Image (cartoon, helix red, strand yellow):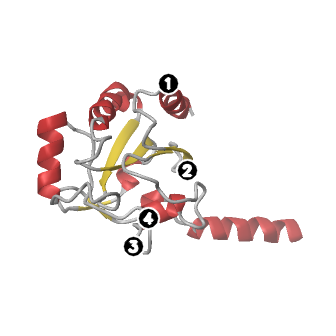
Amino acid sequence: MKAFLLAFMTALSSAHASSVYDHKLKDIDGKDTSLAQHKGKVILMVNVASRCGFTGQYKGLEELHQKFKDKGLVVCGFPCNQFGKQEPGSEKEIKEFCSTKYGVTFPMYSKIDVNGPNRHPVYEEVIGENGPLKGNIRWNFGKILIGKDGNPIERYGSTTSPSSKKLIKAIEKALEG
């Protein structure tokens, strides 16, 4: 009986647990969306900025997206102005910059906070106090790899290039899983 109750309570609590798919987002055009449209895919969440020393990573992120999108990877860009105020533009300006300068075709979302009291719930889910990869994002172009099951796998800092062997190997392994 105890085993049954424990199994029932575990099932009940996990039925109410939230995931990265449950949080409302706005895309770069201001339309309501969420990461639920990417269920079953590997997601690389990246907090991006247009006026940063790492902004050139947009090129590598687009290359990753093109190389692995047919295998199930989706790169998701989250503009953020929290680090050195290096993403001051409007969503329209950000979208134009990304598409004309870097040919970005991966999904971009509206500007959010990734740290602090106004941290977006999707980031809170992953890196917040109760998140599996807890700890603040340190700078622009922080990367978080999410598995096909919606569970966070690993996080990478700004200095981890999109062409990093370590990151590519982790993506390939996640795509197999």
**In the displayed structure, does residue 70 sit left or right of residue 176?**
left
Give the residue pinned by disc 1.
165
- Three-letter amino acid code of the residue under disc 2: Asn
Where residue 29 sits in the image (x, y, percent)? Answer: 16, 57
Give the residue pinned by disc 3.
118
Where residue 42 sits in the image (x, y, percent)? Answer: 45, 40
Q: Which quarter of the figure has residue 123? A: bottom left
For marks 2 and 1, give the CA distance: 22 Å
Q: Helix, strand or loop at disc 4? A: loop
The earlier-in-sequence mark between 2 and 4 is 4
**In the displayed structure, does residue 82 sit left or right of residue 12?**
left
Q: Helix, strand or loop at disc 3? A: loop
- Three-letter amino acid code of the residue under disc 3: Asn
For marks 2 and 4, give the CA distance: 20 Å
- Three-letter amino acid code of the residue under disc 4: Asn
- 67 shown above or below 1: above
Q: Is residue 148 visible?
A: yes
Q: Residues within 10 Å of mark 2 (few under 14, many from 20)?
A: some
**In the displayed structure, does residue 67 sit left or right of residue 167?**
left
The one of 56 and 151 positioned closer to us in this rendering: 56
Are dots 1 and 4 in contact, CB under 8 Å?
Answer: no
Q: Residues within 10 Å of mark 4 (few under 14, many from 20)?
A: some
Q: Helix, strand or loop at disc 1? A: helix
The one of 123 and 70 positioned closer to us in this rendering: 123
The earlier-in-sequence mark between 3 and 1 is 3
Give the residue pinned by disc 2.
151
Q: Nearer the viewer, mark 2 or mark 4?
A: 4
For marks 2 and 3, give the CA distance: 23 Å
**In the displayed structure, does residue 111 sit left or right of residue 38?**
left
Where residue 149 sits in the image (x, y, percent)? Answer: 53, 47
